[in-house]
Amino acid sequence: MKPSIKDVAAASGLSLATVSRALADNGLVNEQTRQKVLAAAEALGYRPNLQARRLRSKQSQTIGLIVADIRNPFFTAVSRAIEDAAYREGIRVLLCNSDEDPAKEAMYLRLMQEEQVGGVIFSPTLSAAAAIAGTTFDFPLITIDRALGDADCVALNNHEALDKLVDHLVANGYRRIGGLFGNTSATGQARHDAYVSAMHRHGLTPDAHRLVPTMDAAQQLVGDRLDAGDAPEALIASNGLTLLGAMRAIRQRGLRIPDDIALAGIDNEAWTELVEPALTVIGQPTYDIGDTAMRMLMNRIHEPALSRRVVALSGELIVRDSTRPRTA
Amino acid sequence: MKPSIKDVAAASGLSLATVSRALADNGLVNEQTRQKVLAAAEALGYRPNLQARRLRSKQSQTIGLIVADIRNPFFTAVSRAIEDAAYREGIRVLLCNSDEDPAKEAMYLRLMQEEQVGGVIFSPTLSAAAAIAGTTFDFPLITIDRALGDADCVALNNHEALDKLVDHLVANGYRRIGGLFGNTSATGQARHDAYVSAMHRHGLTPDAHRLVPTMDAAQQLVGDRLDAGDAPEALIASNGLTLLGAMRAIRQRGLRIPDDIALAGIDNEAWTELVEPALTVIGQPTYDIGDTAMRMLMNRIHEPALSRRVVALSGELIVRDSTRPRTA
DNA sequence: CTGAAAGCGCTTACAG
DNA sequence: CTGAAAGCGCTTACAG
């Protein structure tokens, strides 16, 4: 049988209480006593039972992380940052994929309550707000990438990002600039609005599409536009998948980037640099987003009364060949 | 305060035992009684405390997953498959990144014991074998991608994969075929050996390098070979990062693929299809690997006495332009 | 089918 | 600084 704290107590000739204190290293134990306990524990190969510790101490040392899909490079990078930070603090991370499915989101949020987590970091869908409106949680919630109710939030500065993109294209001589934005997340909405206002600032007419943010949908939509012969001079795609779909549609028709149509997007995924021509993008501070979310969560766990904070982190405009100055 | 099972018992006028049985839905409860309990629980907003349940029942309904780095697309895909399977079974997954660091591996393995997990899926480093040689765990261990001691293992059929790659290159007229293999994992070793035997089978002389499996190392090494003027006719890179490094070195020097040097690799990462020319690769059955690992783990949890099994899954040769038939 | 009681392994006031 | 005792919230033989 696995040795318990009781066995360590017996082996070291001390009481349960003392052994517990020595092992958890929380105060008030004679140094010699502590050494004796440690030696006995070592000899027995004692390992604490975290279930018992958590039940009794009411501290789970665990946080939840609910992302849309870990295979999305954005979330992969953010998750890694969160886990690094958690590791440093001795905290466990429960990772869940919601697949942008409100039912899964609700289920995982409920699970988090049952796990007695200290807090949750979450990338909610648009409909999450409605679904969890009534519910109140026992833990603080930090959202990443997208806002939700009155939860703290850390995300890309979308407004600034779209400004940079539109400014860059305009500076390079493009005027009819189209935009592709997701319709399942608040992010798509935010980027759309930022795009529209940036266009207006330049006295240009917005030409935006909201669509399901998948490669296929974007490829289809852009293809149709191209086939109909009313392609814009430049196109901005609001995330990695739609950017990829747009590029495929353009290539498929034998058109040249940027000569026939310029292309830019958000998310500096590895492939955007490797394709020909390389694509101009806004690189998100992914690691920083994860790290900041973790820091905000720790803060709020320790000081629940803090007022709500929304942190917008700046992205970096990475200029590549897909948006070279217009020659025509 | 959060309602406990006690509150539900009081509200429904039943005993703790009956409420527990009704809630956990394990046998022997009158249907009407069950309904009454469920209604009371619902009304109170009762949520079970999983810490207590696990402590008492000795079943954690949790497994551990220790991968080298979740940002590696191979592990990202495998993890997702494991999580999907776990979700279906109502099991939680504890995800950890070892960074190929034996100390972190040992730490996380110890943590898994403390968490009382039912089992662990693990991608061990080469040195893990030595580090955990003495230790014996309370749970079954399944390794993915790499073998370890007498643990069950599921991985790509490396032998077959290298055979396919070498056969393909030979069939397309290449004879001086070089190979780049990682030196930190058993996988690199296995692929190296498979490559050597495939070359011998064709009566060709192997020309293999073992190196730190990073982009920079591969770029440096391939660059040096090219500069020294003794480049092979074709090059096989044993994983995504070394493949990328090799391609960069070749491009940097203005050489053409495949005319000056053909290039092929393992891991069908998204970018390999998007670059110019697209790269020939072995696509790993990533989702299948994760799914199979999970199935094997469940099997072994239920039947610990099973003899060891090693599952080798076939990869798919995806032929693209980087290995077109040799013209010279 | 239901209930009273013991106990999972730990921590934490409370005395001393 | 150390120990005896209670209790975290649940499940599970054991009776009835």
Image: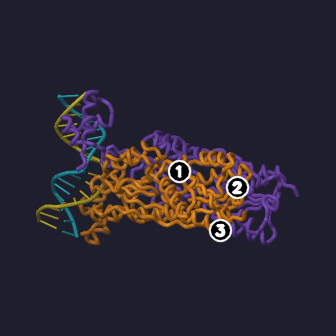
Chain colours: A purple, B orange, C cyan, D yellow
- The picture places residue A37, in percent across and down from the top left corner, at 25, 34
Q: Quadrant of residue A28?
A: top left
Which element is circle 2 on? strand
Answer yes or no: is residue B99 visible. Answer: yes
Question: Do marks 1 and 3 share a chain?
Answer: no
The residue that appears at 50% across and 44% down in the rendered structure is: A84
* Kind of residue at disc 1: Gly
Mark 3 Cα-neighbour bin, 10 Å: few <14, some 14–19, many ≥20: some
* Kind of residue at disc 2: Gly
Which element is circle 3 on? helix
- The picture places residue B290, in percent across and down from the top left corner, at 46, 62
Q: Nearer the viewer, mark 1 or mark 3?
A: 1
Mark 2 Cα-neighbour bin, 10 Å: few <14, some 14–19, many ≥20: many
Q: Chain of mark 2?
A: A
Query: Where does label 3 land, which residue?
Result: A216
- Distance, label 1 to label 3, CA atoms, is 36 Å
Label drawn at residue A265: 2
* Kind of residue at disc 3: Asp
Horizontally, is A35 left or right of A101 in the view? Answer: left
